[in-house]
Image: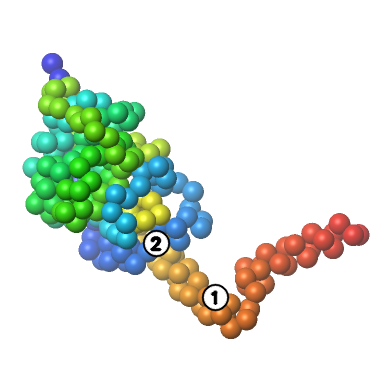
Amino acid sequence: MPDYLIEAMPTRVSQEVLALLSGVETATVGHWRHWGFVDRAVRPVLPGRRVVGTAVTLAIPGPDSTLLHHALGLLRPGDILVVDRLGDDRHACWGGGVTIAAKAAGAVAGVVDGPCTDREEIEASDFPMWSRGLAPITTRLYDLGGMLNRPICCGGAVVMPGDAILADDSGVLVLPVSEAEAVARAALARQERGKGNEQKIANGAKLGELSGASAKVAAALAAAKS
């Protein structure tokens, strides 16, 4: 008997929080936060996209995509389907047909901890997608089981159903809803300060002076002489 563990669809992240996150770069958060980032090998198929949404979590075994096909019928506008491939890097579970179904349901992106296929069809659908590259061997409907809306691991990051997802050219960030607003506001403030520093540098200021790096180097050199 196949083993399917399926929970209810998660509460969606509020539009207010998503609106804040939509102005954030993942790399800005990476200036101070060290967890919640999906492995950098999970890269965008389409460059130049930034998406935010609610995580719907899925875990499916290597050659099988039965539960993925079922999950596509449950997706809602604003969802991002995050797929744990349970270590498989051979079979592409996501291709043109899955892309069309996900987009038709209103999903805003897919994130797969494994390869996808049919890049041309993904491009034609203009559907943001993150994966570990491409593969020609696809999954099939083997009815092996899987988990939907349970805790999963994607690229080393724990993903809970209902987490906030921010994905851009630099990578994918997973944020618990309880932390998402504070992280977004801190990142936006840092980005605003960064713009100010860029203007100062354009006017002749030195980056090391602004960041404090030059002061650290000077202090170390002075200590070495004493």
In this picture the colour scheme is rainbow
Q: Residue at x 65, y 74 (%)?
A: 206
> What's the residue type where badge 2 is placed?
Glu
Rendered location of residue 222, percent (x, y): 84, 63
Q: Let me know if residue 23 appears in the view.
A: yes
Relative image position of residue 180 (x, y in whole percent): 35, 57
Question: What residue did someone put label 2 on?
Answer: 25
Please identify the quadrant where the N terminus is shown.
top left
Callout 1 secondary element = helix
Residue 33 to residue 82: above or below: below
- Name above or below for residue 192 compared with residue 51: below
Residue 80 position (above or below residue 61): below
Q: How many marks?
A: 2
Label 1 vs 2, first from the N-terminus: 2
For the point 47% across and 55% down, the residue is 30
Residue beneath the point at 29% across and 39% down: 134
179 or 104: nearer the viewer: 104
Q: Which quadrant of the figure has residue 189?
A: bottom left
Few, some or many C-alpha atoms within 10 Å of disc 2 (few <14, some 14-19, many ≥20)? many
Rendered position, 119 above or below 3: below
Residue under the image location 26 percent in, 43 percent down: 82
Residue 84 in sight = no
Amino acid type for the residue under numbered disc 1: Asn
Quarter of the image with the C terminus is bottom right
Q: Residue 200 in the image: x percent, y percent? A: 57, 80
Q: Residue furthest right?
A: 226
- Mark 2 element type: loop
Cα distance in 3D space between marks 1 and 2: 17 Å
| Label 1: how many Cα within 10 Å (few below 14, some 14–19, many 20+) | some
In the picture of the structure, the residue carrying the numbered disc 1 is: 197
Name the residue nearer the viewer: 220 or 11.
Answer: 220
